[in-house]
Image (cartoon, helix red, strand yellow):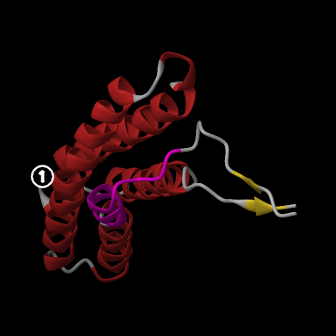
Amino acid sequence: MVAVSAPDYLRPLHPLHSILLAFPLPLFVGALLSDLAYQGSFEIQWTNFSSWLIAGGLLVGGFALLWALINVFRSGRGRRTRPIAYFVSLLVMWVVGFINALVHSKDAFAVMPEGLYLSALTVLLALAASWIGYSGFRAGEVE
């Protein structure tokens, strides 16, 4: 006999939500890489690249954040722990990314080293948010 076990508290992400969640991490990684390139070359265009990549990550991350907030209210009373953790991780990622965008709006020579540190922190937070978001998929076990 085959029994498939799937906990009902794990809910798969909507496909559109998955697409939205896929964008912030690579965009913030690109911003971190362009900050590293600016640190090595002091070519001002690298900070412009970082600013645009951060803005893109914030834009798409904002839509994923909105979707996560809706999922918090859609989840049942006793099953809100995971959606709340996911929403909070996205919110912290977005706030740190916004502060990073404000730092990158300064003069190019005034961006370092705070911009680099904030970009690295934003990448780690985006990785954690993606991990929490994508780990909510149901996984059936065959016994």
Seen from the viewer's position, the closer of residues 82 and 41 is 82
Residue 54 locus on image (x, y percent): 22, 59
25 to the left or right of 101: right
103 relative position to 1: left or right: left
Q: Secondary structure at mark 1?
A: loop
Residue 136: where, in percent of width, then height?
55, 50
- Vertical position of residue 68 compared to residue 49: above or below: above
Task: Identify the magenta region.
Answer: 11-22
Q: Quadrant of the N terminus?
A: bottom right
Badge 1: few (under 14), some or many (20 or more) residues near its Cα, within 10 Å? Answer: some
Prevailing secondary structure of the magenta residues: helix
Q: Is residue 92 above or below residue 29?
A: above
The amino acid type, in three-letter code, at marker 1 is Ser
What residue do we see at 51% from left, 25% from top? 80
Q: Where, by quadrant of the figure, is residue 91 drawn?
A: top left
- What is the total number of numbered labels drawn onto the structure image? 1
Tell me what residue is drawn at x 47 percent, y 23 percent. 76
Residue 109 placement (x, y as % from top left): 20, 61
- Pick out the residue farthest to the top: 77
Q: Which residue is mark 1?
A: 105
Query: Does residue 19 show up magenta in the picture?
Result: yes
The quadrant of the rendering that contains the C terminus is bottom right
Closer to the camera in the image, 56 or 44: 56
Q: Is residue 132 left or right of residue 120?
A: right
